[in-house]
Amino acid sequence: MRLLSLTVALVLAVALRGAADDSMQFRGPRGLGVSTEKDLPVEWSDTVGLRWKAALPGRGLSNPVIAQGRVYVTACSGFEQRRLHVLCFDVKTGKLLWDRQFAATGTTVCHPKTNMAAPSPLTDGRSVVALFATGDLVCLDRDGDLVWYRSLVGDYPTVGNNVGMASSPVLVGKTVVVCLENVGESFVAGIDLATGENRWRHERPRGINWVTPVLFDRDGRTQVVVQGPRDLTAFDPVSGKRLWSTEGSFATMASATAGDGMIFAPGGKFTAYRPDKDTVQLLWQNPKLATGYCSPVYYQGLVYTVSAAGVVNCAEPGTGKVLWTERLDGNYAASPLAADGKLYVLSEKGLTTVLQASGEAKVLATNQIDDTFLASPVAADGAIFLRSDKFLYCIGR
């Protein structure tokens, strides 16, 4: 009987863990913009190649997150965007399973390009955590029942939205890491997934910053790397211990990425570092690798950047040498997705250019959906998910 119980427990534990092809937080696994999905679609339109298309109740910049056959996304609606939504769809059919709504407790004044549903949610398959630009932080279970709720502007009254906050929470184990850098009280905090209480908290420099922390592995342990305008700092996600830090001039919109023991940080000069215990080695800098809004990606031994004007660069990770440059049509806010040997680059007007991920420039396809897209594309369940202001698109067989 005990053996049977252990077997059942093991099966449940595996089932509730995110599958390898799930995309459970901003820019997918570890926030790197890379997916292990295979056989992804290359060509589509708004009438061909869609698995489903679901209407959304309001605007949002957040990318969808996917786990255990469910797609979660946030939106904002109502007067001055004061109604906050967390929605759940069936990954196969696009059926709306639930829509939970909350009233904003913080200010909703922001730049017209952004909105209150700018940060992406996260999930571990059991829980869904959503942070809004109003400072409202909510945790629901997979069926939409409330687990806990916090008004961060209630806890820290000087936190200011100003032109719009967009940093997404990240999950390490059972710790939700939230970074709020603004003109008011600024901090990075580790929050207990089960209770919503702070496990640790560190002050951060005041100033507007939209960057999401990235996860970096060293010696078999995960570090949370926080990028500010003037520093790159790593923390232990469990204890909150400050592990290392380096100064520089970094982007306030595009997040860093990591790969092969290196961290690639956008900024005035795109910079590569190699952290080593409590020191950080600067490897190279290249001002030609512009990023704008778009976070870079490291994939299959190469680094890719996309500028706001649609200039795609491919560079060697060890030297920063640019191997090729491709100029695309349109303006770009969404970060690129690397998957299935390809690079998916989505413009604001719905043009997705599919490039071969290699040391030579090769455009495989261009696909148009007439809609407005600022959220980053996501791959999961054999499909690509695109989120606009009005719809959630699932592209795939």
Image (cartoon, helix red, strand yellow):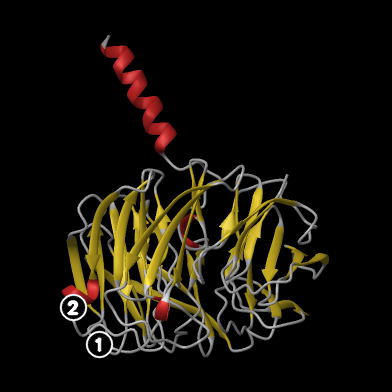
- Mark 1 element type: loop
Q: Is residue 292 left or right of residue 353?
A: left
Compare residues 352 and 357 and report the one nearer the observer: 352
Residue at image x 41%, y 44%? 125
Mark 2, residue position: 156
- Mark 2 element type: loop
Number of numbered discs visible in the structure rendering: 2
Compare residues 365 and 271 and report the one nearer the observer: 365
Q: Which amino acid lies under the numbered mark 2 shown in the image of this protein?
A: Tyr
Position in image of residue 296 (x %, y %): 57, 73
Mark 1 vs 2: CB contact within 8 A: yes
Q: Residue furthest front?
A: 79
Q: Is residue 277 visible?
A: no
Mark 1, residue position: 184
Compare residues 296 and 99 and report the one nearer the observer: 99
Residue at image x 50%, y 78%? 254
Residue at image x 40%, y 52%? 123
Residue 301 marker: none
Work out whether 92 lies above or below 219. Answer: above
Position in image of residue 68 (x %, y %): 48, 41
